[in-house]
Image (cartoon, grey):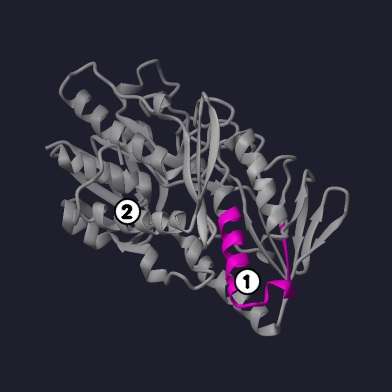
Amino acid sequence: MKKVLILGGGFAGVEAAIFLRKKGYSVTLISDRDYFYIYPTSIWIPTGEAEFEDICVPLKDLQEAHGFELIIDEVKEIHSKERRVVCANGEYRCEYLVIAIGSGKVKHEGSEHFLSICGKPEESLEIKERIDALIEKGGGKIAMGFGGNPKDPSNVRGGPAFEVLFNVHNELKKKGIRDKFELTFFAPMEKPGARMGPQALKMMDLFFNKLNIHKHFGKKIKRFEADGIVFEDDSKLESDFTMFIPAGDGHPVFRNSDLPLNEAGLIKVNDYCEVMHDYDETPEKYNVFAIGDSVALDGPDWRAKQGHIAEVMARNVAFNIDAIAKGSEERKGYLDHLNILCVMDSGDGAAFVYRDNKGGKMIPMPVIGHWLKKGWGWYCRNSKLGKIPRIPGM
């Protein structure tokens, strides 16, 4: 039986493990934490609508459901030409290597002064503690935003920043203390959220005005301080608590590897997610693949990394590995599947956002949208555990 080694227990890694096991391969998954974290639904932890345990699926449960080998360890080095991986507690080899350990974060001066909903999962609990402290205090200034990476614009997470702020607004409103807080959304680009399309951008502006959320756009961030954010012109946005999502860049482990990287330190792959080694022009010769946030994503200017794209890559890699093993020339690529798709939650409703090459749209879904996203979280957990059928393509 061919042996596949998967690095990473997120959306991409778990999906690859599930579909490779369906095809009968011996799969070993290495993760530095023992649970799969459903990041899109972690937005409810800061407001107390979800508990931390609600967002975690033990990898042991997924292992038992699908029959892959699980190793909890930290990857230190990747020697892709040899398909050899060095971890903190061991060294591993395989016939096929799938890299899905995500990305690193763009470094900012004063990063100790903000928390991120897309950072380490435990930070979601710290965000809740900081917001609860301000509520107990009786009010304050809260700033939330996200950053960009000019070297790789696709590696940006803006949606969760919007969602957490909207949910905090809704929670404060329910408590009858919204007027005691000043909420501000900030970003270094002139039009944050522009990749969703002009209609969505216009609707976001209406949201901000309706909810009395201040905007601070178009100035590069110089540093973060305990009481706010300093921008390139030395102006300062005061904040009692700052939530910020840095843009992604290459994972630190990639620097200890022989992987081909782009300017941002992300792995170069082709449409089939084969790592494009510069040894020669035959990437399939090395049987090394990269998926999800680890890769330098090709495609249109509006492209963005999302969980469903990571899962498309993972399913394609399972297909492509099987095709290679069988000597078939057939391959599946991810470029035809690029789109932006999300349900942007506000706590009391949501908006359906979709973008492809034909344009973008944002459709408000009062009340029902919130429960639709809740339902997706339930579906994500239970379908991955094999307790309910998978919806085709999801």
Residue located beneath label 2 in the image: 380
- Residue 117 is tagged as none
Can residue 7 be seen?
yes
Determine the image quadrant of residue 189. Answer: top right
Element under disc 1 = helix
In the depicted view, which residue is nearer to us: 346 or 297? 346
Residue 386 inside the magenta-drawn segment: no
Percent x, y of residue 90: 31, 54
Look at the picture and state if 281 lies above or below 393: above
Front tag of 1 and 2: 1
Q: Split into 4 quadrants, where in the image is the N terminus?
A: top left
Element under disc 2 = helix
Find out whether the residues at labels 1 and 2 contact each other: C-beta distance under 8 Å: no
Determine the image quadrant of residue 138. Answer: bottom right
Residue located beneath label 1 in the image: 173
Question: Dot 1: within a 10 Å radius of its alpha carbon, few (fewer than 14), some, or many (20 or more) residues?
Answer: some
Percent x, y of residue 302: 57, 31
Q: Residue at x 63, y 65 (%)?
A: 169
Q: Residue at x 49, y 73 (%)?
A: 48
In the depicted view, which residue is nearer to us: 195 or 233? 195
Instruction: Determine whether, in the image, residue 277 is placed left or right of residue 137.
Output: left
Look at the picture and state if 183 lies above or below 97: below
Tell me the chief SS of the magenta region. helix
Q: Residue at x 55, y 32 (%)?
A: 360
Region in magenta: 161-184
Instruction: Determine whether, in the image, residue 235 is placed left or right of residue 258.
Output: right
Determine the image quadrant of residue 334. Answer: top left
Question: Dot 2: within a 10 Å radius of its alpha carbon, few (fewer than 14), some, or many (20 or more) residues?
Answer: some
Q: Amino acid at mark 2?
A: Cys
Look at the picture and state if 49 lies above or below 109: below
Percent x, y of residue 377: 36, 57
